[in-house]
Image (spheres, grey):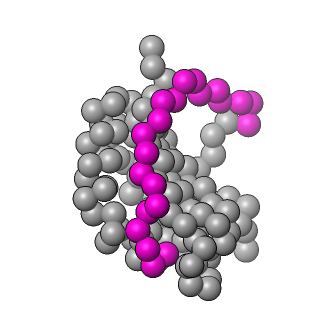
């Protein structure tokens, strides 16, 4: 049995405007998180960032069809996506990957803000 069908969408932050990391955190926590909690076929999504370097959405879907449909829709609108608007440029990569296995540790998966969002 397949563990899942992955998709990674990455933007460069090298030329992004000042304060973009905070704006991305605000957007993810205020809007994007809720949207993806109800996306059919999505097993989970993580938002990853290295300030000043890159910002990435990493998705795992239950089926290749669901992943491929999402990728096609996203790629067609990537330039105008909220992430692209905040960052000021389109993604540098949109790529599929195989999820070989997923292990959930004793701490379990958590939803919500990461350490960069602590007030």
Q: Can residue 29 be seen in this view?
A: no
Query: Which part of the image, by quadrant, shows the C terminus?
Result: bottom right
Q: Nearer the viewer, residue 21 or 10?
A: 10
* Residue 36 falls left or right of residue 49: left
* Residue 87 falls left or right of residue 117: left
Question: Residue 18's image quarter?
Answer: bottom right
* Residue 59 falls left or right of residue 20: left
Query: Which part of the image, by quadrant, shows the N terminus?
Result: top left
Residue 104 in picture, x, y percent from top left: 65, 30
Residue in the image at 30% along x and 46% along y: 70
Residue in the image at 57% along x and 78% along y: 15
Indicate whether residue 90 is drawn in magenta: yes
Compared to residue 27, the image places residue 17 above or below, namely below
Residue 32 in picture, x, y percent from top left: 44, 62
Q: Nearer the viewer, residue 67 or 107?
A: 67
Residue in the image at 48% along x and 30% along y: 98
Q: What stretch is highlighted in magenta?
A: 87-107
Residue in the image at 39% along x and 30% along y: 62
């Amino acid at each position: 049995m397949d563990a899942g069908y992955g998709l990674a969408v990455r933007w460069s932050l090298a030329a992004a405007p000042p304060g973009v990391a905070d704006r991305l955190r605000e957007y993810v926590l205020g809007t994007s998180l809720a949207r993806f909690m109800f996306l059919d076929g999505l097993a989970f999504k993580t938002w990853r960032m290295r300030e000043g370097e890159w910002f990435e959405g990493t998705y795992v879907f239950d089926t290749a069809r669901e992943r491929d449909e999402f990728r096609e829709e996203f790629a067609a609108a990537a330039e105008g996506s909220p992430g692209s608007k905040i960052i000021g440029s389109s993604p540098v990569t949109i790529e599929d990957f195989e999820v070989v296995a997923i292990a959930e540790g004793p701490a379990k998966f958590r939803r919500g803000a990461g350490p960069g969002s602590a007030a």
